[in-house]
Image (cartoon, grey):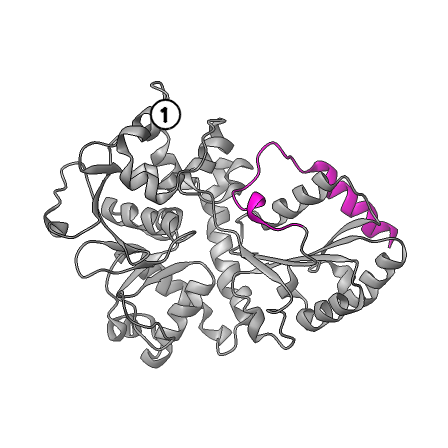
Amino acid sequence: MNELFEYSDNQIEQIPVDFVRYLYNSVHWNSRLIGIKGGRGTGKTTLLLQYLRESGLHAPEAVYLSLDDLYFTTHTVTDTVAAIYKRGGKVVVLDEVHKYAGWAREVKNLYDRYSDLQIIFTGSSIIDIAKEEADLSRRAVLYELHGLSYREYLHLAHDIRFDSIPLQGMLNNGRELRSAFPKEFRPLKYFKAYLEHGYYPFFTEDPDTYAKRLQQVVRMTVEFDMAELKGFDVRNAGKLLQLLGIVAQSVPFKPNISKLADKTGIHRNSLVNYLHYLQRARLVHLLYPAGKSTSTLQKPEKLFLNNPNLATVLSSAKPNTGNLRETFMISQLRVKHRVHHPASGDFLVDEKYTLEVGGPSKTGKQIAGIESAFLVADDLELPTAGQIPLWLFGFLY
């Protein structure tokens, strides 16, 4: 037990707090049971270690436990937390819960047993707590952590600091936005680098190995995390990686399920399910038409990679510029907004705003006559009459 305490304190003391993610100030930290899920590499562990450091508590009052530690091959979470509680425990963080069998039932029992103990857990984005053996959905306050926005990347990589900008203000206040940025700010200077390697916070550890690490993240997600999904046959992991490679060279596109099935060897009846699995793993994003209910069996209208960094890593050829534009847009919009495929244009946001994305010479022909429609242009530094810079959507969170 003392070794756990020593490890926890070391992890907490070493964590930097000069940069915190967008989600930090949105979490209701006084809740008794908090869950934070997200894709691999998005920074869930760092977020919670920062919370523990800011609390000023040390073991045994506040303890960080990683459930993929070998310790938990011979000890249960229930017995471990009980021992911590008896020694004065107030806050327990359970990291990587999806790697511990039966975690939901044990967390539920601990929540019910210790009314003055705060429990915070992290897990893969594949977790659906409403479908776990013990339903925690009525007890836990659940959040999801996405990758870095362009705004966060500028802060972390270059110490350039700005507040986030709400979508409505972004669309309707072009003149005010022009004055919100200093004249010396050059937003396009770092934008290409963000599209290539700025979405996952681990780029700071060793930029030269970022691509290799991201490939490992994808492989680990498919081969290990997705094994937790009911209905997923791990023997198809290799085919799923092949599917991602095909998607990377084609997206965004309207998927032809029969052709994808032929190319990958995955039965067409399973392929739509597998696309949903990839979305839950935050490797792809499926876009559906507005006004229609979404079901697991429904074929998406358009298929995207989860973020532009994946396009750089997974594609054998240089990613298409139009591909990167739209992938960037969907990755930034979906964090706080509902996004659908419109009849005209590229994206329908919150069933109200229609967005058409293109290069600097793009016209608004496709969205002419549509109410609340906007043209989003790449390679544009500041808003102009009728055009919003693409990079600006990286300031939504």
Amino acid at dot 1: Phe
The residue range painted magenta reads 1-29
Height in image: 375 above or below 102?
above
The residue beneath circle 1 is 181
Q: Residue at x 78, y 60 (%)?
A: 71
Q: Is residue 61 visible?
A: yes
Quadrant in which residue 270 is drawn:
bottom left
Report the front residue among 43 and 385.
385
Q: Determine crowd level at label 1: few under 14, some 14-19, many 20+ residues with C-alpha closer than 10 A.
A: few
Q: Nearer the viewer, residue 107 or 176?
A: 176
In the rendered image, the vertical position of residue 234 relative to residue 346, given as above or below: below
Looking at the image, residue 4 sits to the left or right of residue 183; the answer is right
Q: Is residue 3 magenta?
A: yes
Q: Residue at x 37, y 21 (%)?
A: 182
- The image quadrant that residue 176 belongs to is top left
Q: Position of residue 288 (x, y in %)?
A: 30, 65
Q: Which residue is at a point 51% across and 54% down the rendered structure image?
A: 217
Residue 123 in the image: state x and y as whole percent: 60, 60
x and y, in percent, of residue 60 in the image: 84, 50
Q: Say which residue appears at 83% left-offset and 47% top-offset.
A: 59
Q: How many numbered marks have been drawn onto this rendered protein structure?
A: 1
Q: In screen coordinates, is 293 left or right of 375?
A: right
Q: x, y (%) of residue 225?
A: 55, 64
The local secondary structure at tag 1 comes to loop
Q: Quadrant of the N terminus?
A: bottom right
Q: Is residue 12 shown left or right of residue 206?
A: right
